[in-house]
Image: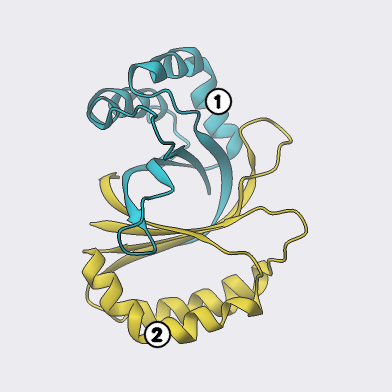
Chain colours: A yellow, B cyan
Amino acid sequence: MIKVTILYPNIQGSRFDHSYYLETHMPMSIGLLGAHPGFKGVSVERGLGGAEPGSPPAYLALCHFLFDSVEDFLAAFMPHAALLQGDMPNYTDIEPVIQFNEVLMAR
Amino acid sequence: MIKVTILYPNIQGSRFDHSYYLETHMPMSIGLLGAHPGFKGVSVERGLGGAEPGSPPAYLALCHFLFDSVEDFLAAFMPHAALLQGDMPNYTDIEPVIQFNEVLMAR
């Protein structure tokens, strides 16, 4: 299983609309990507703080999509890439860090 | 629910022993932290690549602990902090990015 991780860095002066992200963008993303049989799960988080008490989080928001394979994710995502990426300015001006991971352990 | 995210940046020339991490460090961490009633789950991933085909991942390894609350995590972790942090040089010389997150959606 693979995980696609999307991290929005906590950049000073940047804009991130958590309500739009959670209530509009993510339901749309899940509706489109979740229809693919390789879709296995999703989680969304909001950064609370860093390891040191009172320190800011490195990332404002985090999103993880689980798929059977990278190929499955791309097959699910590519047909909707323009729509989903085009929605990003509606909630943020932050360039996310995106990476593909192999899931080694999940319980 | 909260998630504690531990990210090991992909720094050129750095050292990360995935076998030791997965087969020794993580089982020890899970054995110690998983005994707390607030423990809800864990996942471990290995970075495969970035969003651009052929690009390196931003993080070599990622670990996520789910707990009922930050207080529960700290209660579980603090008694074993010295042991767990002391084991880190056995698999890496990378300083991880650690942050606490509120889980907004998980399915």
Instruction: Give the percent coordinates (x, y) of residue B76.
Output: 49, 26
As drawn, the residue found furthest toward the right would be: A13
Res. A22 image quadrant? bottom right
Instruction: Give the percent coordinates (x, y) of residue B98.
Output: 54, 37
Question: Which dot, 2 or 1, sits closer to the camera?
Answer: 2
Q: Which amino acid does label 2 sit on?
A: His
- The residue beneath circle 1 is B75
Residue placed at 28% from the left, 27% from the top?
A: B17
Quarter of the image containing the C terminus of chain B?
bottom left
The subunit carrying tag 1 is B
Instruction: Give the percent coordinates (x, y) of residue A46.
Output: 60, 55
Residue placed at 30% from the left, 59% from the top?
A: B54
Q: Who is closer to the viewer here, B51 or A87?
A: B51
On the picture, is B47 further left or further right than A7? left
- For label 2, the SS is helix
Instruction: Give the percent coordinates (x, y) of residue B1.
Output: 53, 49
Q: Residue A80 carries which label?
A: 2
Estimate how packed mark 2 is, as few (under 14), some (14 to 19) or many (20 or more) residues with alpha carbons within 10 Å.
Answer: some
Residue placed at 46% from the left, 18% from the top?
A: B85
